[in-house]
Amino acid sequence: MKPPSPADFGSRLRSPAVAARVGVWLAVCFGICFLTGLVSHYAQNPDQPVSFPTSPAWGYRLTQGLHVTTGTAAVPLLLVKLWAVYPRLFERPPVGRLRPLVLHALEKASIGVLVGAAIFQLASGLANAAQWYPWTFSFRTAHYALAWIAVGALVLHIAVKLPVVRHVLSHDVDNADHDRATATEVEALSRRGLLRSTWAAAAVAVLATAGSTVPLLRRVSVLGVRSGEGPAGIPVNKSASAAGVTATATSSAYRLELAHGDRELSFTRDALLAMEQATEVLPIACVEGWSASGAWTGVRVRDLLDLVGAPRGADVVTISLQESGPFRVTTLPGNFADDDRTLLALSLAGEPLALDHGYPCRLIAPNRPGVLQTKWVRRIEVVV
């Protein structure tokens, strides 16, 4: 069977004028995704040359919400962009001189890398938001590495296509200066109509998912994940049953261990409740893009650390009752441990913590990824 050629695609809609306009917004979405992804990756690093800030308390909620929302908006933009430039896939390489042939091959290779990386990033990101992992590799590591590849290929592609992009954007969308000679078929849908449909599809994608972060949109965000269900209106990613802690978390033998060097104390939950309590309204914001605020009540972590003479600025390791999992042990940087809003929470919305929210006690701190807000805390160790 003979492969298609650019001449087989005659629609005027498959035009650089359309591709460039869609590409601008696709580049904006990718840029926001990349920058907010760097924020999320850094926030989860245990070793930070510069400590991640504790304020504003809603900072991570905003950046991760933008990350997932712009990634979702990029899906229809990418599909239309690929549809518009699809005929160029079948362009024949130049014959004769070596230099044009090499440049053609390099351009096609860079586009292949860009398209492959973009599809991987969007597909894996959506799968992560849905907590569906049909792979064995680390999502965080792969997503971070491919982000650099995608952005590098995007910058190279923009540099190569910049003269064409500048020209078509400075002219009317129906200008045909850069159209393929065979792109002459007039469709029922105009170029402006196609662009308006594309913007509408991107807007619908945003509205259908943004409710995971924006409470006012939850009723219309039919595709929003974990957007309000759960005890006290706070979603649950991992239940106590899934973490295997139901028996140990509810046992009368439970004790919170607090250690600094050779000094060690232990507390029952009742002993923690007898201490001075503080209430803070703080969001839980997870990498999947969902977030929700709650009124948490418990003991300030700084007050606990004072009991064992821990110096200010010291990092703290929190250990969960979970027996396995990548976030069973997390590091709480010193600036978070010293912040008065950082609590070892015992209650939520005036009620004892639900088992799935971390009973008997959990960590809650401002501007911190949800995966690091350790649940079912059994031990706190000061790093010395």
Image (tube, rainbow, N blue to C red):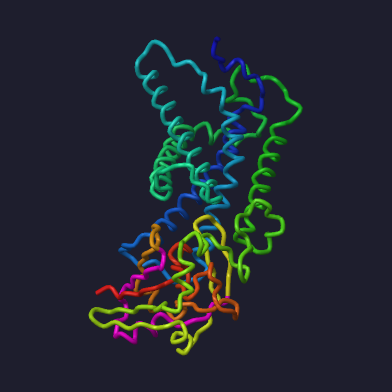
Residue 104 appears in the rendering: yes
Q: Measured along the vertical axis of the image, is residue 297 above or below residue 244?
A: below
**Number of numbered markers:** 0
x 39%, y 59%: residue: 324
- In the foreground, 104 or 56: 56
- Residue 64, given in percent of the width and then of the height, sits at 51, 58
- Residue 345, given in percent of the width and then of the height, sits at 49, 77
| Quarter of the view holding residue 333 | bottom left
- In the foreground, 352 or 371: 352
| Quarter of the view holding residue 303 | bottom left
Residue 365 appears in the rendering: no
Q: Measured along the vertical axis of the image, is residue 307 above or below residue 347?
A: below
- In the foreground, 183 or 322: 322
- Residue 237, given in percent of the width and then of the height, sits at 53, 60
x 69%, y 35%: residue: 194
Quadrant in which the C terminus is drawn? bottom left
Residue 232 is covered by the magenta coloring: no
Relative to 65, is 13 on the left or the right? Answer: right
x 53%, y 70%: residue: 355
Residue 304 is covered by the magenta coloring: yes
Q: Measured along the vertical axis of the image, is residue 64 above or below residue 90?
A: below
- Residue 265, given in percent of the width and then of the height, sits at 32, 83
Quadrant in which the N terminus is drawn? top right
**Farthest residue, direction right:** 188
| Quarter of the view holding residue 214 | bottom right
Residue segment shown in magenta: 295-322
